[in-house]
Amino acid sequence: EIVLTQSPATLSLSPGERATLSCRASQSVSSYLAWYQQKPGQAPRLLIYDASNRATGIPARFSGSGSGTDFTLTISSLEPEDFAVYYCQQRSNWLFTFGPGTKVDIK
Amino acid sequence: QVQLQESGPGLVKPSQTLSLTCTVSGGSISSGGYYWSWIRQHPGKGLEWIGYIYYSGSTYYNPSLKSRVTISVDTSKNQFSLKLSSVTAADTAVYYCARGVNEDAFDIWGQGTMVTVSS
């Protein structure tokens, strides 16, 4: 089973700052990586698929990069509604796993 | 647009079978290219993929749950279902149904339903 590790566990930033979240896979997942945002009491929302493609309706301040084992989600300038938990997720051999999440909170 | 809605008991006794249904509205579950999935989240924890079913009926399950999981589809009702047998307190979680796309992501999620395993 491929294990995803996310860092940092918590990121404390102010609105307007840039957020850089990391996701590392225990072995290559090619570009089969997605990112989600989850707010309390809500279902996750797909932000990025195939490592770097924004999902429908996702603002341009969200971007994804990477391939193989190292991936990054960048939020160029945090808006108040961006403070949430972010999960990465991979698909390998038609099995899926999620990372433990990074919480982005207000500094 | 396509929406998903979970339904089922919120309380299940230990050793019994958890049964949930996801109703798809705004689109056909028989549309090719999608895989209809169940994902759960233990209280205060991360996400765990349970399994999925193609419209054709092919299924894939999380190896850690495979012996207890059955996912089925009813195209006439535009629904798919989850059965998890021999539940314990460790199966207490919010259960989500979701639509898988592009071979690697879940783009539409239900609101989730909390299931508690307790006597």
Image (cartoon, grey):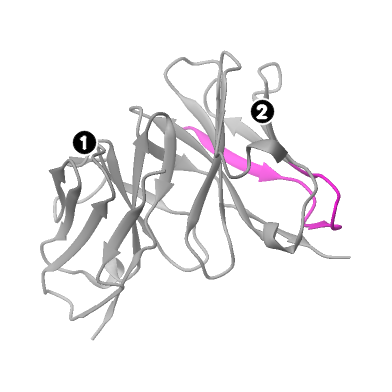
Query: Relative to A6, is B58 above or below?
Result: above
In percent of width and height, residue B27 lies at 52, 24
Q: Which residue is drawn at 43% across and 40% down?
A: A96
Q: Using the image, name the chain to which the residue with label 2 belongs.
A: B
Q: In which quarter of the image is residue A13?
A: bottom left
User: Quick check: A73 above or below B80?
Assistant: below
Write the start and end of the magenta stretch as one range: B1-19
Q: Does the magenta segment cover residue A41?
A: no
SS for dot 1: loop
Residue B83 appears in the figure: yes
Q: Is residue B3 magenta?
A: yes
Residue at figure coordinates x 42%, y 18% from the top left: B33
Note whether B31 is above or below A8 in the view shown. above
Q: Which amino acid does label 2 sit on?
A: Gln
Q: Give left or right: position of B81 versus A60.
A: right
The secondary structure type at the circle numbered 2 is: strand
CA–CA distance in space, label 1 to label 2? 31 Å
Q: How crowded is mark 1: few (under 14 residues within 10 Å), some or many (20 or more)?
A: many
- Residue at the (18%, 81%) spot, across then down: A14
Location of mark 2 (residue): B79
Looking at the image, which is closer to me, A58 or A52? A52
In the displayed structure, does residue B106 sit left or right of residue B80? left
Task: Name the kind of residue labelled 1 in the image.
Answer: Ser
Label placed on residue B110: none
- Position of the N terminus of chain B, as image quadrant, is top left
Q: Mark 1 points at which residue?
A: A31
Of residues B16 and B37, the one drawn nearer to the viewer in this rendering: B16
